[in-house]
Amino acid sequence: MQAQKEFTDYRHLKELGGLELLKAQYHQKQFSKHVHEGYCIGVIEDGAQSFYRSGQRHIAPKGDIILVNSDEAHTGSSAVDSGWSYRAIYPTPEMIADVTQDFFIKQQIPWFPNAVIHDQGLAQQFVLLFDLLEQYGNTLLKETMYLSTLACLVSRYSRKPQAIIDLPEVEQKINFVKSLMTDTPEYDFSLNELAELVSLSSWHFLRQFKKIVGIPPHAWLIQIRLSKARKQLKQGYKISDVALNCGFSDQSHFNRHFKKAVGVTPLQYISYLK
């Protein structure tokens, strides 16, 4: 594949509860460690992608499926000189729960242990799904294809995540802080006060947070602020108001972080909603 201009195209599928569909081509783009509110389920359509997930680096060549769990720290860059292109959907845990509510005796959110899956048949099914989702109309067919494709993925490759009640004490404390920051991302937290909330020293808290979450507290805060920002942009808030509501110091600061994480500016993101 010859190096081509980078592009990113976002679509928000109202008929599927606001499911996000991404089509992108990157050459020199490098995503630093970040998280998504939803799962990332994609297929590499050209080139190869390199990314960090689950404590190690993975390579996904053309035709392979990439999987990142919700709120799981990961990176993204090209594994070859020519770059990579892919399409992906980002279902939230709530969307996955709705789809899989009849899969299990007890309701549970799926967890995918494998970051890269080589399953030619399933990859082709996802490509057909992506093609269909880009078309106008055919809502019933889209819903049917979406449901059957996710059902196939979950039944073949998901595992039960570790139950919260089995977590060590320090991990419970870190998850408490994560929840607090998620609920109030606009607040200007200090490392000291977060550590004091769970009776840890600042240094121990910082090390444990990064070990358990995959990124340090300040980076996590940026990610959840961006998650809130995307919701408000979808709701029609002005960009300047979103920046203020979500705790960014100014609109320039917001624009810089948004483009670095999402790949497009807030203004471009809004244009894809229309």
Image: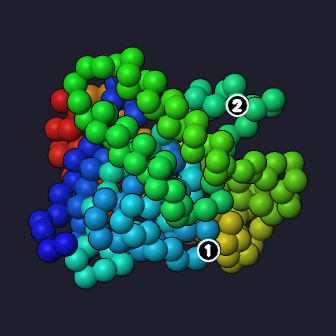
User: Is residue 42 at all visible to an observer of this figure?
Assistant: no
In which quarter of the view is residue 209 placed? Answer: bottom right
Residue furthest front in the image? 121
Q: Is residue 126 left or right of residue 96?
A: left
Q: Amino acid at mark 2?
A: Phe
Q: Is residue 206 left or right of residue 265?
A: right
Residue 103, label in figure: 2
SS under mark 1: loop
The percent coordinates of residue 133 (x first, y second) are 31, 33
Q: Residue at x 40, y 48 (%)?
A: 124
Question: Mark 1 sits on what residue?
Answer: 55
The percent coordinates of residue 42 (x first, y second) are 42, 52
Q: Amino acid at mark 1?
A: Gly
> Looking at the image, is 245 positioned above or below residue 161?
above
What count of labels does the image hold? 2
Residue furthest bottom in the image? 81
Residue 124, label in figure: none
Q: Residue at x 12, y 68 (%)?
A: 4
Q: Residues within 10 Å of mark 1 (few under 14, many from 20)?
A: few
Residue furthest top in the image? 140
Judging from the image, the colouring scheme is rainbow
The percent coordinates of residue 47 (x first, y second) are 29, 70
> Looking at the image, is 119 positioned above or below residue 46?
above
The percent coordinates of residue 89 (x first, y second) are 40, 44
**N-term mark: 2 or 1:** 1
SS under mark 2: loop
User: Is residue 139 at all visible to an observer of this figure?
Assistant: yes
The answer to whether the residue labelled 2 contacts the one labelled 1, judged by CB atoms less than 8 Å apart, is no
Compute the Cα span from label 2 to label 1: 29 Å
